[in-house]
Image (cartoon, rainbow, N blue to C red):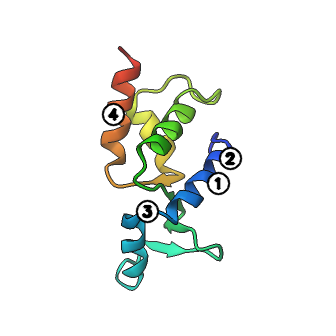
Amino acid sequence: TTGVEPDLISQIKEAQKEDSEIWTIVENLNKQVEFRLDDDNVLWQNTRLVVPNDASLREALLTEAYSSPFSIHPGSTNLYHDLKQHFWWSGMKRDVATFVSKCLI
C-alpha cells in the first residue's frame, strides 16, 4: 500500500491528461521502453505512477507521504525510497530533499 489517499491518486491520473511533458512521453512511447499506458490511458514508469509537473500536486503527495501514520518522519532518503516504489517524476529526489529540509526547519 502507498499510504496515499485514493483521491490524490485520482487527481494525479486526471492531471496527467493536462500535462505537456507527459504527452511528450506518450507520443514517444515506442522509444521509451520503461513507460507504458494502461487501459485507462494512465501513464506508468514500469510499476510507478507518473506524477505530472504540477507543484501543488507534488507538494500534496510529499506532505501526505511525510505525515502518513506509516512513516516515522523519515529523512529524505527514506521518504524518497518509499515514494519511488509507487511514483515517478523527473527531479523527484531533489524535490524530496528540498521538501524534507523545509520540514526540518
Q: 77 or 90: nearer the eye?
A: 90
Assign a secondary structure to mark 3: loop
Q: Is residue 1 visible?
A: no
What is the x, y in percent for residue 45? 46, 65
In contact (CB < 8 Å): disc 1 and disc 2: yes
**Badge nearest the viewer, 3 or 1:** 3
Look at mark 2 in the image and give the residue it sits on.
7
Real-space CA distance between mark 4 and mark 3, rounded to the nearest whole angstrom: 24 Å
Assign a secondary structure to mark 4: helix
**Badge nearest the viewer, 3 or 2:** 3
Mark 4: amino acid: Ala
Q: 17 or 84: nearer the eye?
A: 17
At horizontal 38% and vertical 37% (from top left) the residue drawn is 96
At horizontal 31% and vertical 49% (from top left) the residue drawn is 91
Look at mark 4 in the image and give the residue it sits on.
97
Look at mark 3 in the image and give the residue it sits on.
19
At horizontal 42% and vertical 40% (from top left) the residue drawn is 80
Real-space CA distance between mark 2 and mark 4, rounded to the nearest whole angstrom: 25 Å
Does label 3 or label 1 sit earlier along the sequence? Answer: 1
What is the x, y in percent for residue 81? 45, 42
Q: In this rendering, is residue 101 above or below 42?
A: above
Q: Is residue 76 visible?
A: yes
In contact (CB < 8 Å): disc 4 and disc 3: no
Look at mark 1 in the image and give the residue it sits on.
10
Real-space CA distance between mark 1 and mark 4, rounded to the nearest whole angstrom: 25 Å
Quarter of the picture holding the C terminus: top left
Does label 2 or label 4 sit earlier along the sequence? Answer: 2
